[in-house]
Each structure stands twice: as structure tokens, then as C-alpha cells.
Image (spheres, rainbow, N blue to C red):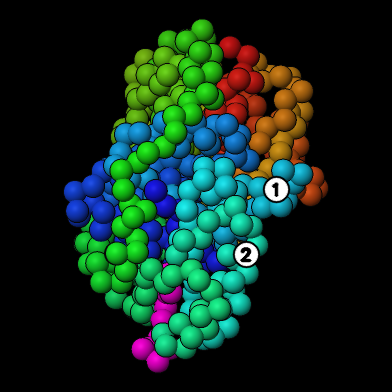
Amino acid sequence: MLIIAGERSGVGKTTITLALLSWLKSKGKSVQSFKVGPDYIDPMFHSAITGLPCRNLDPILTSEDYVKSCFSYHSQKADISIIEGVMGLYDGVPNSSYFAYGSTAHIAKLLQIPVILIIDCSKLSTSIGAIVYGYVNLDPEVKIVGIVLNKVGSEKHLFLLKEGLKICSTPVVGVWFREKNIELPSRHLGLIPTEEISTYQEIFKDLALMADHSFQWNLLTPYLQKNQTKTNNKFLDNLDHFIINNKINLRCAIAKDKAFNFYYQDNLDILEKLGIELVFFSPIDDVKIPDNIQGIYLGGGFPEVFASELTKNKTMRESLKKAINSGVFTYAECGGMMYLSEKIIDFEGKSWEMVGVLPNTAIMDKKLTLGYREAKILIKNKLLKETIILKGHEVHRAKNTNIPNPSILEVRDYYTQEILSYQGWQINNIYASYLHLHFASLLIKINL
């Protein structure tokens, strides 16, 4: 078991994690991967390699108990568990429990799993010693057992880096020289999902080959043995008990294609455990929504990128509009909410017709809205009590032409508690906002 962490964002953490996963799969290992924090796209790459759904470990959106239960339960199903960290090792939210709550370091402490730290060496030489020394000694309970040197320019550069590291006892377990042949394509919200990359399997093969000669396997292999996690399913057992006593028998249509694919696997699992039959459909390719449904779930994604295809599928838009206006319960997050608007105006200023059940136009903007949120419910509704505070995450480059009146949510920054927006519609049994929610924390708050 290992956590792959970075000294900061952009050090090549995802590429090296994918290389390690690819190498392990090429050796016939079953691998369960995890991702720290609120991420959808990196887990898609993990799952494309391992064949198993990647799980998010996020104590801010869920709880420490849920993280421990989730990791314990899913690790038992595979030979090896690999966790990809988020941002820099100690990048988290300060609180009374830990100065870097929700960070990769926090997860390492919580699960007692060793860390491999990746350093971007492109602008470093002997100063690397001070950086690694600080990371290793900042919190002795975070066990950094190896260093990966990434973006090394030459053998001379490598010599200088190793000289600087003599101040530290942590071994170098991998050296990755600057490599321009393998680049994962990206756009305005990060990596482009695997559904849009026809050559991703070839990329994974190349990464596995690079991993084969870039790691010191004699140093790394001891941490890649059969999982021996302590069983800790307390939270999941309590969740199952709650679910058993609150079964819901209905069919829910879930939008899932290259335009809508931001879903936590845990959310889908929870819905199925509740007795809800999940029926997937494509707003791009299908002519109408599935028959005999009592619910619609529209997750996030990239409707702005595929706005032309969504607009052209008029029969689907009319089918959705008819079902929603008839009162079918509809839950939409971020991109899903944008799809329900009257129009989307893309980055080039082109206007595209959408479903039109929300009195709004979503306009793409250069400004990135990103971060953890707390949301206070402002109006009485059938789903949640007004006293409940929701915890969620925002990540988008869109803004609305209209603020809902009344808004269903008062949204604050999770850390500073600054009010950031009033948002969210409740119309014709629609619940829609920019917030991405994890259902593990939401479930026990629903009025079933």
C-alpha cells in the first residue's frame, strides 16, 4: 500500500501514479486505486487501467470514519492499494484537528500508510535537500519512505540532486527524466476524460514501459505486497443499517456520456443500496429519456464542450422537459444544471439551446470558481430540513445570467465562511445548483 504525493500541484503526480498502476496491471496484479479529495477526472483514468472503480477519500465532504471504512472495505477486494494524493502533500484546510485537514498528509496519518513524495526537479539542484528535509520532518507521523525525482534534465543534473539529498536519509526510489513523448491532454478544468481519448490504452502501455526502467523496484516492491488492512467498516455498517430500514423502490435515469460523467462511484452505490434502479442514458446520443422513471440525476461534466451535440438532439431535450414539467424528481449538479438552463454561451460567445426548464443562461467565463463550500438551505422543501448545512465542492468556469429568486442556498467558503453566492433552483421538483455533493454525508439528512 502506498500514497503517491507531490510537494505541490503540477509535479507530475497523476502521470507517475498512472504509470505505477499500468505497470502493476501489466504484471497481473489486481489494484484498487483511491484519490484524495474531490476529483472526478483522475479517477476515470485510474479505473480505465485497473478495471475497478476508483474511490475518493475526502474527510471534508464525508468524515474521517467514512474514509477509514471506505479504504478498508474496498482494499480487501484487491492485491494492492494505491492512493493518489491531492495538490501538495500538506495542502489542506486548517482546523482544530490538524493544520492540513483533508490533505494527503492527513489521509496518510489517518490510514497509517507510507508516502512516496514526487519532486519537480526542473528548476532545482542541491536546494532539493532543504525541501525534502522539511517535508520529511514537518510531521513525523507522516511516513515518507521514498522520493521520486521528476523532470530531471541530465545525468549531471541528477548528480547535483543526489548531492543535495545527502542531508536526508530518505532513499530515491525513482528517477524520471524529462519526457515529452507522453503528455496527457488537458483543457479548462484539468485533464480530458478517457471517454474522449481514443489512444489512452496505448498511453498506458507506454507509461508502464517507462515505469519499468524509472523506478528502483528493489526499494519500492516491499510496499507493493498483498493488502493487509485492518477491517474497519464501522461507518459503512451503520450506513447499511440505515439504508435497510429506508428502502426506496424506484427507477432513476442518470445522464452519463462524454458530456456528463462527474459522478462519485460511492454516490451511485448508495443509490443502488437504497433500492433505486439506475438506468443510464446519453443526452447526446439517445432520442429520449428511459421509460417508467421516477427520478432524474444529471451530474457535472462538460456540456459547454459538447453544446452543439446537445442542442442538435432536440428530441432528448423535449423528452426531458416534458418529464421534468410533469413533476419527475430531478437532481442536477453544475454541468447538469447548465444543461437544464435555457441556453449555454460557450467560450467563443456562441449561444446553444438547452432544455429550458430553468430561467437562466449559463455563460462560460475565464474565471475559475473552485473550493470547498458550506451551504445553508434558505427555503422550505420536501427533501432536506432548512436547518441542515450542506458540505460540497465547486469547480466550474460558468456564471449565470439570473440569480434564483428565491435562491435555495446561501453558499459560503468552507474555511473563511465568507458568503460567496446565493444560488440553486427549486422549480417543478427540480433541485439544481453548482455544488457537487457526496451522498454519504447527505443521506442521513434526507427526510425519507
What number of labels is visible? 2
Q: Which label sits on residue 87? A: none
- Residue 363, image x, y percentages: 59, 53
- The amino acid type of the residue labelled 2 equals Asn
Residue identified by numbered label 2: 137
Quadrant including the C terminus:
top right
| SS at circle 1 | loop
* Residue nearest the viewer, comparing 152 with 273: 152
Q: Residue at x 52, y 9 (%)?
A: 246
Q: Residue at x 55, y 78 (%)?
A: 167
Q: Is residue 152 magenta?
A: yes
- Residue 255, image x, y percentages: 40, 34
State whether residue 402 appears in this view: no
Q: Residue at x 77, y 23 (%)?
A: 387
Rendering quarter of residue 175 = bottom left
Q: Magenta residues? A: 148-157
Residue identified by numbered label 1: 98
- Residue 116, image x, y percentages: 45, 61
Q: Is 428 placed left or right of 55 in the picture? A: right
Label 1 neighbour load within 10 Å: few <14, some 14-19, many 20+: few
- Residue 411, image x, y percentages: 73, 40
| SS at circle 2 | helix
State whether residue 169 appears in this view: yes
CA gap, disc 2 to disc 1?
A: 16 Å
